[in-house]
Image (cartoon, rainbow, N blue to C red):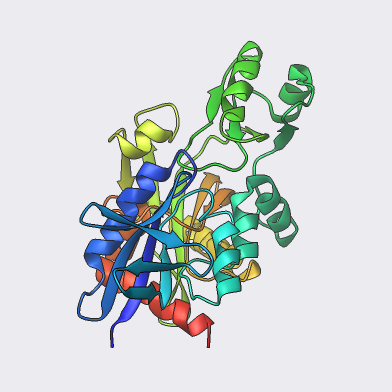
């Protein structure tokens, strides 16, 4: 009998449209001979199963759906939600309570990695470097002189818990800090302000595949914009080169560091970590645990270079989800 797979997509953040695209790519590539696949939209206003534009409400008590006389319960959840509540631990904890296997990492790892400040602080004692940073919470006094003294100029002002470069600004002049901070607060009530690192930016996918931790080929990121912002990521204003044009030493260092972070955090499922090189040393920027899954997204590009098709990539996530529950 085919396993019933719920692909959850959407979410409550500014990334919901990207998530819908990712979820539909998964839907189109899972093997229909092996799986009965259901698209589930999880939005602020509703949780629904979408079938040819007709919607059926999800019962949140047990994550089931009633279709006619049939009550459908799912064998596994494929998580394609970027941002809250699919990438910050909320849904992971919910499915853990319901004892439903799901493809992303567990709730603690999700919450930790979604919080840039906490992630980098946890990894620092293990020898994983990051840029100098300054933290602000909504309501804190803004001391521009203290910020510049700590991180210098230019610097990046980022929403602490947001993805796809929402709420991020590159600041060159002290007088522009407050407007950048206000922009970041539109996405989150916590902010991280980081020193500018002038070096090659790369992205490294690390996944659990066939029961083993696998580091995927490295992607070099080149952008036409001032940095790898939303427009660069999704409007063709960047070039991604896989494998990256970096030295063997750099490739070895960043691959080992990405795997080390994955193992330290006891990660499962997909991850994609971003780094910038200063010399041969990679500095970590962040880790994404529900990365983009469209054909143009970085993780699928990297998997393809490793000889892993989208069909194989997505099916492996389901296989690993079931294995975690054994």
Residue 308 appears in view: no
Residue 49, image x, y percentages: 34, 59
Residue at x-position 53% and y-position 26%: 169
Q: How many marks?
A: 0
Residue at x-position 56% and y-position 24%: 183
In the image, 6 versus 166, the foreground residue is 6
Left or right: residue 255 compared with residue 35: right
Which quadrant of the rendered structure holds the N terminus? bottom left
* Residue projecting furthest to the front: 69
Left or right: residue 41 compared with residue 254: left
In the image, 316 versus 254, the foreground residue is 316
Left or right: residue 310 compared with residue 15: left
Residue 281, image x, y percentages: 58, 51
Left or right: residue 231 compared with residue 150: left
* Residue projecting furthest to the top: 175
Residue at x-position 58% and y-position 68%: 106
In the image, residue 76 above or below residue 1: above
Residue at x-position 49% and y-position 59%: 249
In the image, 40 versus 253, the foreground residue is 40
Residue 288 appears in view: yes
In which quarter of the view is residue 144 placed?
A: top right
Residue 304, image x, y percentages: 27, 64
In the image, residue 109 above or below residue 3: above
């Amino acid at each position: 009998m085919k396993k019933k797979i719920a692909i959850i997509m959407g979410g409550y953040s500014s990334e919901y449209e990207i998530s819908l695209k990712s979820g539909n790519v998964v839907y189109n590539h899972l093997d229909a001979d092996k799986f009965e696949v259901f698209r589930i939209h999880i939005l602020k206003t509703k949780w629904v199963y979408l079938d040819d534009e007709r919607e059926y409400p999800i019962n949140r008590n047990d994550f089931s759906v009633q279709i006619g006389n049939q009550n459908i319960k799912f064998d596994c959840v494929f998580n394609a939600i970027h941002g809250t509540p699919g990438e910050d631990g909320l849904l992971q904890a919910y499915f853990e309570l319901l004892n439903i296997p799901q493809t992303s990492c567990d709730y603690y790892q999700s919450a930790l990695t979604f919080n840039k400040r906490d992630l980098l602080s946890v990894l620092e004692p293990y020898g994983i470097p990051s840029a100098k940073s300054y933290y602000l919470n909504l309501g804190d006094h803004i001391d521009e002189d203290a910020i510049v003294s700590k991180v210098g100029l230019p610097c990046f002002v980022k929403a602490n818990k947001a993805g796809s470069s929402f709420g991020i600004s590159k600041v060159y002049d002290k007088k522009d800090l407050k407007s950048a901070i206000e922009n970041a607060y539109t996405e989150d009530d916590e902010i991280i302000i980081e020193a500018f690192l002038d070096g090659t930016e790369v992205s490294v996918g690390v996944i659990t595949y066939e029961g083993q931790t696998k580091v995927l080929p490295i992607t070099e990121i080149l952008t036409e914009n001032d940095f790898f912002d939303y427009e660069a990521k999704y409007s063709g204003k960047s070039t991604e080169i896989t494998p990256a044009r970096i030295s063997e030493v750099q490739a070895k260092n960043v691959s080992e560091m990405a795997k080390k972070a994955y193992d330290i955090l006891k990660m499962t499922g997909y991850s994609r970590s971003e780094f910038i090189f200063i010399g041969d040393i990679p500095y970590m920027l962040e880790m994404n645990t529900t990365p983009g899954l469209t054909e143009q997204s970085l993780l699928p590009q990297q998997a393809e270079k490793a000889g892993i098709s989208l069909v194989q990539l997505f099916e492996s996530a389901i296989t690993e989800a079931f294995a975690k529950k054994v």
